[in-house]
Image: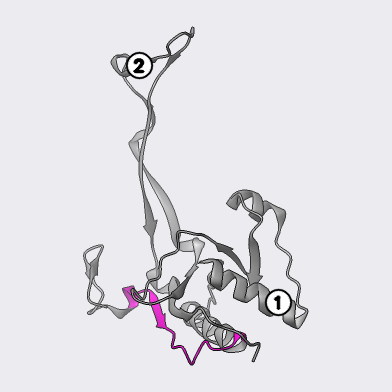
């Protein structure tokens, strides 16, 4: 809440802050409590008349397995469209509240200390890749040309310069300090 992002002070303009929820060990001691806290963070990101909800969740292996365990214990089954699995290049996708959830080994413990999990809820409607028109698939000069050794081939460097942009940070969220010792359903 104190950083300045995009020239806008988050402390002054709360509408520019993403949703951040810190879990407590007691709040995520069971699978039901974890789901309740996760749903609260997602609903907070969705809060408005349009109901724009996060559609992509990214978590570590613990968070992913908790959602799988809850689904298995309650007999719930969710089906992920195959085009999503192809796009993400993984079959490790589950669903929660109409959100596709993937796990990644690179998701950091955003709490900092201890063994905790983090869950990122992204609304991809507000994420864009903006490309510099001067460097969008521009072919390098012939002086930069690459010559393959032992082949009859010539290659050129293709340049693309861009930036990932978020137009509504309030629709993005994180739940961190998720207990990694959940042992019971409720």
Residue 74 percent coordinates (x, y): 74, 82
Question: Mark 2 packing: few (<14 Cα in 10 Å), some, or many (20+)?
Answer: few
Q: Nearer the viewer, residue 167 or 102?
A: 102
Residue at image location 63% in from the left, 87% down from the top: 184
Q: Nearer the viewer, residue 59 or 2?
A: 59
Quarter of the image for residue 126 reads bottom left
Q: Nearer the viewer, residue 165 or 69?
A: 69
Is the residue 66 above or below the residue 108 in the image? below
**Mark closer to the observer (1, 2):** 1
Q: Secondary structure at mark 1?
A: helix
Q: Which mark is residue 145?
A: 2
Residue at image location 60% in from the left, 49% down from the top: 89
Residue 32 percent coordinates (x, y): 62, 88
Going from N to C along the chain, the mark reached first, 1 or 2, is 1
Q: Which segment did they paint magenta? A: 15-31
Circle 1 sits on which residue? 71
């Amino acid at each position: 809440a104190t950083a300045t992002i995009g020239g806008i002070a988050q402390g002054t303009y709360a509408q520019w802050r993403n949703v951040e929820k810190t879990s407590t060990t007691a709040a995520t001691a069971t699978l039901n409590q974890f789901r309740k806290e996760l749903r609260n963070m997602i609903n907070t990101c969705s809060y408005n008349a349009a109901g724009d909800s996060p559609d992509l969740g990214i978590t570590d292996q613990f968070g992913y397995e908790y959602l799988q365990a809850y689904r298995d214990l309650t007999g719930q089954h969710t089906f992920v469209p195959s085009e999503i699995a192809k796009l993400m290049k993984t079959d490790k996708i589950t669903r929660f509240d109409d959100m596709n959830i993937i796990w990644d080994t690179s998701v950091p413990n955003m709490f900092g200390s201890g063994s905790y999990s983090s869950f990122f809820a992204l609304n991809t409607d507000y994420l864009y890749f903006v490309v510099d028109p001067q460097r969008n698939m521009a072919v390098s000069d012939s002086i930069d040309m690459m010559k393959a050794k032992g082949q009859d081939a010539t290659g050129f460097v293709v340049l693309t310069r861009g930036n990932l942009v978020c137009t509504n940070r309030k629709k993005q969220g994180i739940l961190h300090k998720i207990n990694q010792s959940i042992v019971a359903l409720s």
